[in-house]
Amino acid sequence: MIKEFSALKRIKLKGKITKTVIDQTIKSLQENIVLLPTEFNYVFASTNPSRLMSIPTGDILNDNQKVEPAQFVIKSEVPYEQLNELARKILDHFSSSPLIAIIPARNGKIGIQITSSELITKILAQIKTPIYFIENEESDWLNQYRDRLALYIETDLKKRLLSTILDLSSAIPIIIRKGAIPILAIEKVLGRRIKLGRGIYFSVLFVCSGNSCRSPMAKGILEKMLENQNVFVYSAGTIAGAGNLPSEFAIKAVQKYGADISNHLSAPLTKELIDHADLILVMSPKHKDAVLELVPEADVKTFLLKEYAFGQQEEIEDPVGQPLSVFERIAAVIFESLEKVADDIKARLN
């Protein structure tokens, strides 16, 4: 039974974490639910995982992949002996990162997150019992769930990052939920492709200049190649306006490959498009510069199209203003590159 509190207790963390703060937090964790700050977000936490079931988690996990609320651990307590080499690599590299790792346990699987939070580490050392937590995707979580909280520990945390959830209990890691850690960042550490869980979509963003020729052509061709697959494909332009139709020759050039881009409407490149993409493929170095100017951290997932397909530092020629034959030649070059890209994406799909 959830105990309701008539007035939410609040603590504003400033500087040193005192014994009083630790004692109050432990008492509240044991009584009910605490809105607890981590290094990179706020979570709903308790020493009793059943209490957390009253907080909806949305569509974080599929029904066949449900796990108990995750636990905070310090790095020295991670059971490395139960994990394979790939899992150990991930936990070593992404220690104290927004990563919830699902690992084997005595009775199935548990989710863990390695923490370097001073507050959480001190609490774990004192109570010697697990602190369970869940993340919630609601934007107004404090007001929406305040009647279920015993304590809100407030900090100056500015950015709220949703953790990537990765199942490390199988031979090949599986993405259960996409979050702050990009898929390609994980793959770079492992030196191999990982898998996407059921219901997880892989997102590709193509970028050119005006979003009227090259990137719409690439989008249309890749969508046809990956038809009925769990893939979203977008395109944008670094100097594009919004709502313009593609070049007539671009429409004609991709018809050979079964693609129809006649209803495409141009869109400017934005931070939001970059953030939501798992892979960004650009047509020239200046487009890559534009992506990284908006989101420097996107470097791990941003490539020239021919660089990603063949390892070649070559740009895709801009056919704007040229005859149909040039558009057809460029479409053929794009198609050849996308055959490699499509195979690469399919290797991740479960």
Image (tube, rainbow, N blue to C red):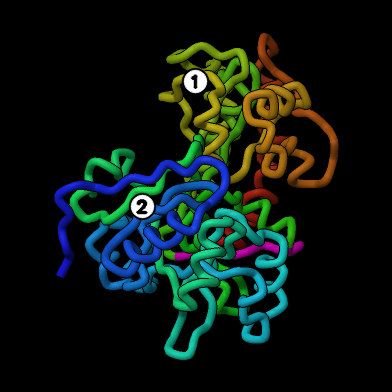
Question: Given the image, on which type of amino acid does mark 2 rest?
Answer: Leu
Query: Callout 1 environment at 10 Å: few (<14), some (14 to 19), or many (20+)?
Result: many
Nearer the observer, 252 or 129 = 129
Start-end of magenta stretch: 190-197
Q: For the residues labelled 2 and 1, say whether their Cβ atoms are less than 8 Å apart.
A: no
Nearer the observer, 206 or 340 = 206
SS label for mark 2: strand
SS label for mark 1: loop
Please state which of the two labelled residues, at mark 2 or mark 1, is closer to the viewer: 2
Question: Given the image, on which type of amino acid does mark 1 rest?
Answer: Ala
Lateral position of residue 157 relative to residue 183, left or right: left
Q: Which residue corresponds to mark 2?
A: 35
Looking at the image, which residue sits at the far bottom? 106
- Spatial CA distance of label 2 from label 1 is 39 Å
Q: Is residue 292 above or below residue 133?
A: above
Decide if residue 350 is in sight here.
Answer: no
Q: Magenta segment, principal secondary structure?
A: loop
| Residue at position x 59%, y 20% in the image | 237
Nearer the observer, 50 or 273 = 50
Image quadrant containing the N terminus: bottom left
Q: Position of residue 217 (x, y in %)?
A: 58, 30
Q: Where is residue 273 in the image (x, y as percent from the top left)?
A: 52, 32
Q: Which residue corresponds to mark 1?
A: 267
| Residue at position x 56%, y 59% in the image | 99
